[in-house]
Amino acid sequence: MERSPLSLKWLEAFQAVARHGTLSDGAQGLGVSVSTVSHHLTCLEQALGTPLLDHAKRPMRLTPAGETLLRRVDEAMWLLRMGVSDLWSGDLASVVRLLRIAHLEDFDTDVAPALVQHLSAAMPRCDFSMLSRPSHEVVELLETEQVDVGIAAAMDRESPGLIEEPILRDPFILVTPRSLPGPAPDLTALQGQADALPLLRYSRKQQIGRRIEAQLRRLGARFPQRMEFESTHAILAMVAAGRGWTITTALTFARAQRYHGDLCAAPFPGRAFSRTIALICREDLPAPIRTLIETGLRGAVQRQVIDQTVARYPWLAGRFEMLGAG
């Protein structure tokens, strides 16, 4: 039987560049130099005797031969990773050398440190890469195989190769300035004072922003388009200064404690709605690692987030809660 001339490294380089569209992004995803990726691609094209990428296009485009090969490479790489996963036992400490995790920015100061402490105790020889991103970017990092694990709002679309486990129910709430007199207003009252006290929106590029806008449309609540932000801290700073009001979630509100003295939080004044925070893992991540991460994550979220927030805002009990525990 004739030996195949192809190298696994060549195929990995081809897959990375095909996914990212440029040599530099592909190299970054693999953690190698651009010259190394370029060399692997050249060797692969020479071995096959046909161009796989149209280098004149930006971003690069696959040739017809490249499209055919990529489908097979994706299948083969998935089978290879699953085969390795099947061989891995519970001896995680000696097998896993690097674990890449991307998580919600709301988990920066408490959940992420607690989680990595939990994991490092179980895998003392493993290196950890922790990235903080908005939910949609976490999913993109997973889909392009730049991370192994994501903690983010549940996906709003199917993504083959990813496993999603619900962790936290995170209800949407109303946040107004403490200087606003009287009890928490309803949406009709807020519409009536929209000129003086506008709705401060999340960017519609973000999943949280799109979710809020969809709920307002369902309720027939219309507010002028005045200001939108990507940062929860920017929004709550504006609300605390009496410049407007907002709709956010219990989790994002809980993380901005510096502004709580100038804010009033209340249940959303309409049909209640919430988002789900989930643990999202690549399908080829060994089951023992998924279990270890989920255990540590649930413990950190319960202790650091749910218990402390509900103690301060008892009306969140039964709304801001763990999902699927036990």
Image: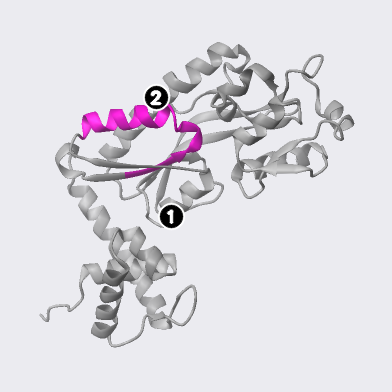
Q: Amino acid at mark 2?
A: Ala
Q: Quadrant of the C terminus?
A: top left
> Is residue 90 at least partly visible in the picture?
no
Image location (x, y in percent) of residue 267: 69, 22
Above/below status of 299 relative to 201: above
Q: Which mark is residue 143?
A: 1
Above/below status of 172 relative to 309: below
Judge the density around disc 1: few (<14), some (14-19), many (≥20) Cα neighbours within 10 Å.
some
Q: Residue at x 83, y 42 (%)?
A: 224
Residue pointed to by mark 2:
300
Q: Residue at x 57, y 18 (%)?
A: 318
Q: Residue at x 29, y 28 (%)?
A: 118
Q: Which residues are magenta?
A: 100-123
- Could you say whether the residue bearing mark 2 is in a helix, strand or loop? helix
Query: Residue 279 lies in what quarter of the image?
Result: top left
Image location (x, y in percent) of residue 44: 26, 78
- Could you say whether the residue bearing mark 1 is in a helix, strand or loop? helix
Image location (x, y in percent) of residue 243: 76, 30
In terms of sequence position, does the residue under pointer 1 or pointer 2 come before the other? 1
Q: Amino acid at mark 1?
A: Glu
Q: Residue furthest right?
A: 192
Q: Quadrant of the N terminus?
A: bottom left
Q: Main secondary structure of the magenta part?
A: helix
